[in-house]
Image: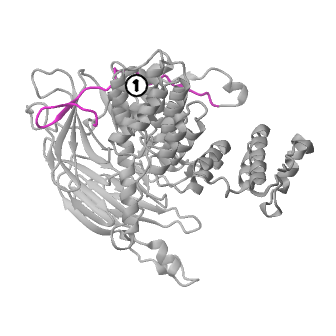
């Protein structure tokens, strides 16, 4: 397959770390997205790398036994290390300050710590097999800095540097899962493990959310743990938190193959089963969430599929069933660059073994190969999807939900207007409507924000946030610049070109979006180019093209091609109640000097206009014959009004007279006529 056939890829610049071996242990922190490579328990070095870290953190620590878990606080200021099932050790990592060390033991007797999670830079949660303990770290550094100078640390700090227990909850725990993006910890409880208890953490508070039960494929035959953490994931999809359950066998007898069940976990209210993703195959699976898409990897076939829960599915009355958006494809082949000196690196890169059994996936989009020493972010490639999803309406629904969609959306619009891939007009209309629906949503949100701002809500009400202009907002300027103007110049059937342009304007009007004048201008220019004056007249007569000053100016400039355009433009300007001098200014700014002069003569105002203003505009066009015509007109006016063609000093036209002489010579000046 060519590169255009793969819609998933590993990021170009992965995090590279020392691969796992008997001496080097590798840990991953899902909150900071950091990989820890711990050599010999830390005695011979710890190297910490993250996706955004330009400089890795390196340090040594005393080997106090096997490291079970190691994580930095959210600002990398405090290191927490678990070596036993009872305690967690803490070390201060603030630059230019003493390295304070202290230990915290779990409060519950006979409990074993399963792990811990940082929920802020100073708050940490211990998860034990008997419950959950929420702690706040002591401000040891603050106490130290507030101490009197010269006092030693021990005299300033209390002997017991205990963490403050904010809240705890006793509950039997099989395993736990943490979603740092939403600060929710999920605990597996009961004998079967399928009753999940979520807790939400925010600003020193721990909230217990309603527990819920995961429906197992069939009634378990034994009372042993039936729900493994390998089959559960937590991720934010379209701004909502979901628990994803990989059910290896469907509950319905008529369906074979695994499925992914999505439970919506709101902050308030009960968890609810919402979606089922049909995989139609069995085997080993792994889940990622990329750009709000659920990606399901299948190890046996070494392929992946993607699901979009925003696309229309089959609703059975309680849940929505979804099928893969696209055919299954492998992740794009990846080459591991050879590290080393330049002469060595000239050799061919090593192909990476995709879907390796050593791969471990983390949410939302991380794939780690501990045996190869790489951390990748999984990415979606949009351009290949264009040819894999022939239904343009569904394709547009899919693309408009993606983060980096604008370039591809515009390319789809251009492609469907080409001779070879020309879409039917109803399909084009559907695409335009989907674009303008998103455009209108943004315009309405922007207007609401502006009105709220003007009403002063920002001072009294909640914090106002300007609506984000996502890449799904494709406005008229985008369409004109990248699609329609180029399309109108192509050798295409003229009626199709006009129909497409009018279809876009129709769609804008349908969503009550004010049509920009340059789109009307494009229609008029296209009509004139193809000599479709009768159609132009009808569009103007029946107000298909909205009145505007720029449009009226354009019509004035078309008088030489189509004489009725002059009167059409004047009628339009009168409907707009435009002041005459303003019309002249608009025309001159467009370098329509003759049109401006004709307009002035049409309303009988030629005796009072400024000669200098018109001569300035004519000179700026760098059209000498135009300048000659305008100059001669004012000479004739002077002759008629004053009996002399010369300009008076008060008209300030000396430089224009000099320019006229320079270009045409003294003899070209008009001589006074005597009667």
Give x and y (percent) for residue 519. 49, 38
Quadrant hosting residue 401:
top left
Residue in front for this viewpoint, 529 or 488? 529
Q: Is residue 412 something one can see in this rendering?
A: no
Q: Residue at x 26, y 44 (%)?
A: 242
Picture quadrant where residue 167 is located: bottom left
| In the foreground, 371 or 377 | 377
Relative side of 226 to 372, left or right? left
Can residue 448 be found in the magenta stretch?
no
Q: What secondary structure characterizes most of the magenta part?
A: loop
> Furthest residue to the right?
666
Q: List x then y, in percent, for residue 668.
A: 87, 42
Q: Position of residue 90 (x, y in %)?
A: 43, 61
Q: Residues within 10 Å of mark 1 (few under 14, many from 20)?
A: many
The outermost residue toward the bottom is 148
How many numbered badges does the structure rendering display?
A: 1
Tag 1 secondary structure: loop
Question: In this picture, which residue range is highlighted in magenta?
Answer: 310-339
Which residue is disc 1 drawn over?
Answer: 355
- The residue that appears at 23% across and 63% down in the rendered structure is 168
Relative to the observer, which residue lies in front, 301 or 56? 301
Q: x%, y% of residue 104? A: 35, 63
Image height of 650 relative to 310, above or below: below
Tell whether position 317 is magenta: yes
């Amino acid at each position: 397959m060519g590169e255009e056939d793969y819609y998933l890829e590993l990021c170009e610049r992965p995090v590279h770390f020392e691969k796992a071996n008997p001496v080097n242990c590798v840990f991953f922190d899902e909150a900071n997205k950091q990989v820890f490579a711990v050599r010999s328990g830390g005695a011979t070095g710890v190297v910490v790398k993250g996706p955004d870290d330009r400089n890795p953190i390196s340090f040594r620590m005393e080997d106090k036994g096997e490291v079970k878990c190691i994580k930095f606080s959210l600002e990398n200021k405090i290191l927490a290390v678990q070596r036993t099932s009872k305690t967690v050790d803490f070390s201060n990592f603030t630059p230019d300050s003493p390295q304070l060390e202290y230990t915290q033991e779990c409060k519950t007797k006979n409990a074993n710590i399963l792990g811990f999670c940082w929920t802020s830079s100073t708050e940490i949660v211990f998860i034990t097999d008997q419950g959950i303990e929420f702690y706040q770290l002591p401000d040891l550094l603050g106490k130290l800095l507030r101490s009197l100078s010269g006092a030693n640390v021990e005299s300033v700090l209390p002997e017991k540097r205990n963490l403050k227990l904010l809240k705890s909850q006793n509950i039997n725990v099989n395993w736990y899962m943490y979603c740092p993006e939403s600060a929710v910890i999920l605990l597996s409880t009961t004998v079967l493990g399928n009753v999940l208890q979520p807790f939400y953490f925010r600003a020193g508070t721990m909230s217990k959310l309603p527990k819920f039960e995961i429906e197992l494929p069939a009634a378990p035959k034994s009372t042993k743990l039936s729900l493994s953490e390998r089959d559960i994931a937590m991720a934010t999809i379209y701004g909502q938190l979901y628990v994803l359950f990989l059910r290896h066998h469907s509950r319905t007898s008529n369906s074979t193959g695994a499925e992914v069940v999505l439970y919506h976990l709101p902050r308030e209210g009960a968890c609810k089963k919402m979606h089922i993703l049909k995989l139609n195959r069995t085997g080993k699976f792994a889940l990622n969430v990329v750009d709000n898409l659920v990606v399901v990897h299948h190890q046996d076939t070494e392929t992946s599929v993607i699901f979009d829960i925003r696309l229309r599915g089959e609703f059975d009355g309680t849940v929505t069933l979804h099928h893969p958006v696209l055919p299954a494809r492998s992740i794009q082949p990846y080459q591991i660059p050879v590290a080393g000196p330049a002469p060595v690196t000239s050799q061919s890169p090593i192909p990476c073994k995709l879907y390796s059994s050593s791969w471990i996936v983390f949410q939302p989009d991380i794939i780690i190969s501990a045996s190869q020493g790489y951390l990748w972010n999984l990415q979606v490639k949009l351009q290949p999807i264009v040819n894999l999803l022939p239904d343009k309406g569904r394709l547009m629904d899919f693309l408009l939900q993606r983060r980096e969609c604008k370039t591809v959306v515009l390319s789809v619009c251009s492609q469907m207007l080409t001779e070879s891939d020309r879409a039917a007009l109803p399909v084009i209309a559907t695409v335009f409507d989907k674009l303008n629906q998103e455009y209108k949503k943004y315009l309405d949100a922007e207007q609401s924000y502006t009105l709220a701002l003007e009403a002063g809500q920002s001072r009294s009400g909640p914090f106002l946030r300007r609506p984000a202009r996502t890449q799904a907002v494709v406005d008229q300027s985008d369409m004109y610049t990248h699609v329609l103007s180029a399309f109108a110049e192509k050798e295409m059937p003229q009626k199709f070109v006009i129909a497409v342009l009018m279809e876009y304007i129709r769609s804008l009007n349908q969503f009550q979006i004010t049509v920009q004048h340059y789109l009307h201008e494009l229609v008029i220019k296209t009509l004139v180019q193809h000599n479709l004056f009768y159609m132009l007249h009808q569009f103007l007569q029946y107000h298909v093209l909205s009145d505007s000053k720029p449009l009226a100016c354009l019509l004035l400039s078309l008088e030489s091609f189509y004489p009725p355009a002059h009167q059409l433009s004047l009628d339009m300007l009168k409907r707009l109640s435009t002041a005459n001098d303003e019309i002249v200014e608009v025309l001159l700014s467009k370098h329509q000097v003759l049109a401006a002069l004709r307009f002035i003569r049409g309303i009988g105002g030629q005796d009072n206009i400024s000669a200098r203003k018109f001569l300035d505009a004519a000179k700026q066009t760098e059209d000498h014959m135009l300048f000659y015509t305008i100059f001669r007109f004012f000479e004739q006016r002077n002759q008629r009004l004053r009996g002399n063609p010369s300009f008076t000093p008060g008209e300030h036209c000396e430089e224009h007279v000099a320019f006229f002489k320079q270009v045409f010579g003294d003899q070209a000046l008009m001589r006074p006529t005597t009667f």
